[in-house]
């Protein structure tokens, strides 16, 4: 059983193994890593560096994760070299597991068996959508059926399975993304990531924005869509382990993001939105109180407050009451509040 928060050592292989670039993709900017090939020696160096970090001994479970690119489409020699470099660390229990990211159409029986024998325990699929028209417009080059087939294959080999989704792709809508979420729930993956589409300078999608061919999601719209998707997934018992792109140094540079819901705290915005929805039933109705105080578990306070106290303003607008105080009360379960009317 994995720890709730394992130490993950990321090894980025931007665009390596990818058959082409999708309309939205610039993995070098997303990861702030060059697209130069990585070898076993580099893997050794990164893992040895991680061992010297202060967080290393603090986590009981430590995982090596190959992100970016299409891992299963690398040559067999490269796969053996990269995973072979990790093998001694697994044997000595310095690290405990390996995960890789790959396209749904990159795996067959032979590749799945190879990854399993070389120590991979989790495979994340860049599914992006379960709508074939959306996939076609994004120039993904695979279908929803490819995802269904590959999830079944990975289950047969007893991998943990992750699904990565991208709301806001060309041709997508809130309704289509909701349908995607329902199809993913039926496949019962072990985890999901939500990456709403961000328009990055230099991509084909950036050209589509400039020509008026594509309209990116606004921030509020993306928060709502992701909150609704996250609620459905987690109510079905599927954890959402990441919401929004990592705030890399490259994406922070002025002019690199041309559109879409780019926000360094996007995940927190979504989690706060979900929290606000869950506590609505515990709040007084409009005009029932002039002033209120709220008792809340200490770990939930940041979610209640929201980004820059937007959650506080939302509650005051909804209840038409001023909030006198927010009091930590760890006798309450997470997700519950107690309102005292003054």
Image (cartoon, rainbow, N blue to C red):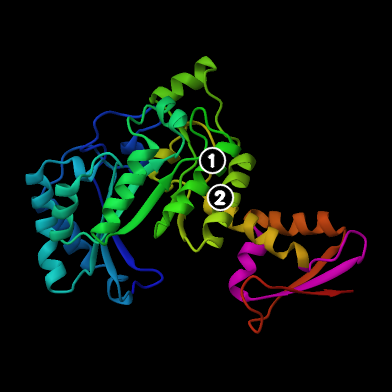
Q: Which residue is mark 2?
A: 229
SS state under label 2: helix
Question: Can you say whether 88 is above or below 161 in the image?
Answer: below
In the rendered image, is residue 265 in sight? no
Check residue 320 for magenta coloring: no
Report the span colored magenta: 282-306
Q: Which residue is mark 1?
A: 177
User: Which is more toward the observer, 267 or 249?
Assistant: 267
69 relative position to 144: left or right: left
Question: Which part of the image, by quadrant, shows the N terminus?
Answer: bottom left
> Picture quarter containing residue 17?
top left
Q: Residue at x 39, y 44 (%)?
A: 249
Which residue in the rendered view is the most extreme toward the top? 211
* Contact check, label 1 and label 2, Cβ < 8 Å: yes
Q: Residues within 10 Å of mark 1 (few under 14, many from 20)?
A: many
Q: Position of residue 109 (x, y in %)?
A: 18, 48
Q: Residue at x 36, y 39 (%)?
A: 145
Which residue in the rendered view is the most extreme toward the bottom? 331
Of callouts 1 and 2, which one flags the residue occurring earlier in the amino acid sequence?
Answer: 1
Q: Residues within 10 Å of mark 2 (few under 14, many from 20)?
A: many
Q: Position of residue 14 (x, y in %)?
A: 26, 40
């Amino acid at each position: 059983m994995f720890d709730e928060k394992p130490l993950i050592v990321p090894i980025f292989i931007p665009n390596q193994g990818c058959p082409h670039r999708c309309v939205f993709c610039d993995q070098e900017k997303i990861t702030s890593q060059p697209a130069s090939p990585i070898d076993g020696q580099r893997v050794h160096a990164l893992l040895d560096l991680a061992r010297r970090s202060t967080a290393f001994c603090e986590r009981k479970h430590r995982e090596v994760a190959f992100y970016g690119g299409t891992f299963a489409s690398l040559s067999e020699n490269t796969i053996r070299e990269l995973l072979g470099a990790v093998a001694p660390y697994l044997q000595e229990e310095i690290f405990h597991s390996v995960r890789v990211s790959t396209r749904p159409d990159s795996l067959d029986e032979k590749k799945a068996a190879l990854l399993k024998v070389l120590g991979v325990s989790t495979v994340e699929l860049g599914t992006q959508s379960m709508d074939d028209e959306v996939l076609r417009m994004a120039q993904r080059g695979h279908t929803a059926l490819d995802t269904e087939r590959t999830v079944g294959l990975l289950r047969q080999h007893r991998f943990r399975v992750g699904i990565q989704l991208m709301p806001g792709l060309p041709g997508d809508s809130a309704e289509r993304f909701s349908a995607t979420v329902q199809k993913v729930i039926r496949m019962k993956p072990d985890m999901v990531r939500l990456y709403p589409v961000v328009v990055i300078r230099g991509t084909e999608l950036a050209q589509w924005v400039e020509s008026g061919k594509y309209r990116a999601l606004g921030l509020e719209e993306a928060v709502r869509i992701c909150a609704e998707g996250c609620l459905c997934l987690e109510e079905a018992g599927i954890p959402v382990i990441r919401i929004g792109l990592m705030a890399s140094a490259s994406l922070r540079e002025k002019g690199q993001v041309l559109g879409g819901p780019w926000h360094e705290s996007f995940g927190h915005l979504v989690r706060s939105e979900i929290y606000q929805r869950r506590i609505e039933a515990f709040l007084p109705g409009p005009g029932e109180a002039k002033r209120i105080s709220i008792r809340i578990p200490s770990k939930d306070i940041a979610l209640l407050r929201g980004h820059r106290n937007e959650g506080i303003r939302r509650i005051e607008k909804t209840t038409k009451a001023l909030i006198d105080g927010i009091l930590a009360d760890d006798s309450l379960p997470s997700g519950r509040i107690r309102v005292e009317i003054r």
